[in-house]
Image (cartoon, rainbow, N blue to C red):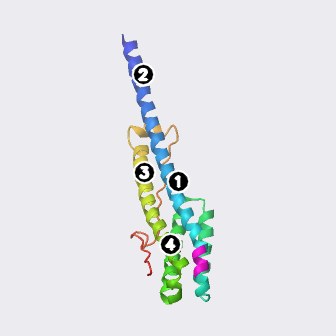
Amino acid sequence: MTGTILLIIFGLLIVFAILIFNRLIRERNQVRSAWSDIDVQLTRRHDLVPRLVEAVKAYAAYEKATLTAVTEMRTRSERAQRLGERARLEDEMEAGLHRLIALAEEYPDLKADENFLDLQARLVEVEDHLQYARRFYNGAVRIYNTRVETVPDVLVARPFRFLPAEFFEPDGEHARATPRVEMSV
């Protein structure tokens, strides 16, 4: 009789562990999927950078330092291995893109250029999608990390090496605010 009860309890513990394991897998996959969404938006942003630089270069040749800095940040971000490093570089690139867009104010011909206006509109769209993807990713990471670090899930997470995920949080004061890219008309 006690052997049967112990067997039932052991069976229930196994089922409980399997349920927790599956939930951890689901949450980890949600984090990975959310990162993929961020990566898509970063790729879209990175694809716009050379075209935006070229559009500005045609009107503002002596603004070479800003143009070069944005291009270099794009390259460094694409090569970044760690999420924190990539977030920092993306933050720097975002600031550089804001400076690049601000240059348009000094060049009325650039402000009126159809290609520049199209690129600027696309950048606004990408920035909006990126902010949404970042919030979604960080929410998924928060949920996953809470599960990995709290009882009873931690009892399954540790032996199966479920590690906490890293948040995608750019550094800098302006990164805490919603980015604004003003549209020139």
Locate the N terminus by quadrant.
Answer: top left
Any part of residue 3 in sight: yes
Disc with the residue nearer the chain's start (3 vs 4): 4
**Against 95, is 13 above or below?**
above
**Against 61, is 17 above or below?**
above
The amino acid type of the residue labelled 1 equals: Ser
In this rendered view, identify the residue nearer to me: 98 or 15.
Answer: 98
Residue displayed at 43% across by 70% down: 175
The amino acid type of the residue labelled 2 equals: Gly
Measure the alpha-carbon separation of dots 3 and 4. 23 Å
User: Residue 93: horizontal and vertical position, in percent?
Assistant: 54, 72
Cβ atoms under marks 4 and 1 closer than 8 Å: no
**Against 100, is 162 above or below?**
above
In this rendered view, identify the residue nearer to me: 11 or 65.
Answer: 65
Q: Say which mark, if any, is on residue 94.
A: 4
Disc with the residue nearer the chain's start (1 vs 2): 2
Q: Say which mark, if any, is on residue 36.
A: 1
Measure the alpha-carbon separation of dots 4 and 1. 19 Å
**Against 137, is 98 above or below?**
below
Q: Say which mark, if any, is on residue 11.
A: 2
Q: Quadrant of residue 43?
A: bottom right
Measure the alpha-carbon separation of dots 2 and 3. 31 Å
